[in-house]
Image: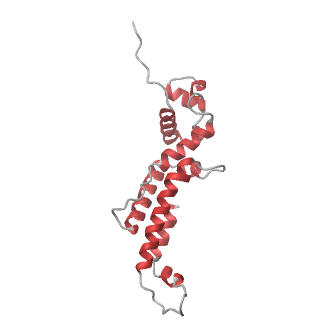
Amino acid sequence: MTSPRRTPLSRDRVLRAAAALADRDGIGALTMRKLGQELGVEAMSLYKHVANKDEVLDGLAELVLAEFELPTDDVGWREAMHRRASSARTALTRHPWAPAVISRSGPLPLLLSTTVAHGWRASAARAETARRRIPSRQPSSGVGSSNSASTASAMPASTSSLLATCL
């Protein structure tokens, strides 16, 4: 008689179980031993897939950040920022432990420094392009002068608060 085949462990499976455990019991309840119990394995089995608890926490940050909507070119910068802020709020509400994990000391997860940062840069570039299209409210003070201050002031204050919500 053969026993039922157990789903093999993987880094993704370990991280998803860690997220479920943190969602259910809080991030303080997350230990390698409890995570192993959650997966039906000994804690030592986890170390084939994650080096230590810090790697689990970095992986959790990556999972949550991956839920943030990245910008697309099919909408304007305001709509893109609104979607991103909304998706960030949804993800952070779903995982109340996430802000502490994302902002903990040490290097940020690779996802934050590449994929998400790329998304912010792309939106910032679209926002800059949109701001350049807004006519200046003050006359130019001469040849070669910059209207960056007046152009920036033309951007609605709600945009600043929306950006702050994203960060």
Between residues 107 and 118, which one lies in front from this camera angle? 118
Task: Please identify the residue farthest to the left as the structure is shown.
Answer: 74
Between residues 3 and 153, which one lies in front from this camera angle? 153
Residue 5: x %, y % from top left: 41, 18
Between residues 126 and 11, which one lies in front from this camera angle? 126
* Residue drawn at the location 60% of the way across and 34% of the way down: 31
Quarter of the image for the N terminus: give it. Answer: top left
Task: Please identify the residue farthest to the front as the structure is shown.
Answer: 143
Say if 28 sits above or below 125 in the image.
above
* Residue drawn at the location 45% of the way across and 51% of the way down: 91
Task: Please identify the residue farthest to the top as the structure is shown.
Answer: 1
Say if 115 sits above or below 37 in the image.
below
Residue 62: x %, y % from top left: 52, 46
Say if 74 sits above or below 136 in the image.
above
Task: Please identify the residue farthest to the right as the structure is shown.
Answer: 106
Any part of residue 97 in sight: no
Any part of residue 47 in sight: yes
Q: How is the image coloured?
A: secondary structure
Residue 98: x %, y % from top left: 53, 49
Residue 86: x %, y % from top left: 41, 59
Say if 47 sits above or below 55 in the image.
above
Side (left or right) of 163 relative to 109:
left
* Image label count: 0
* Residue drawn at the location 58% of the way across and 43% of the way down: 58
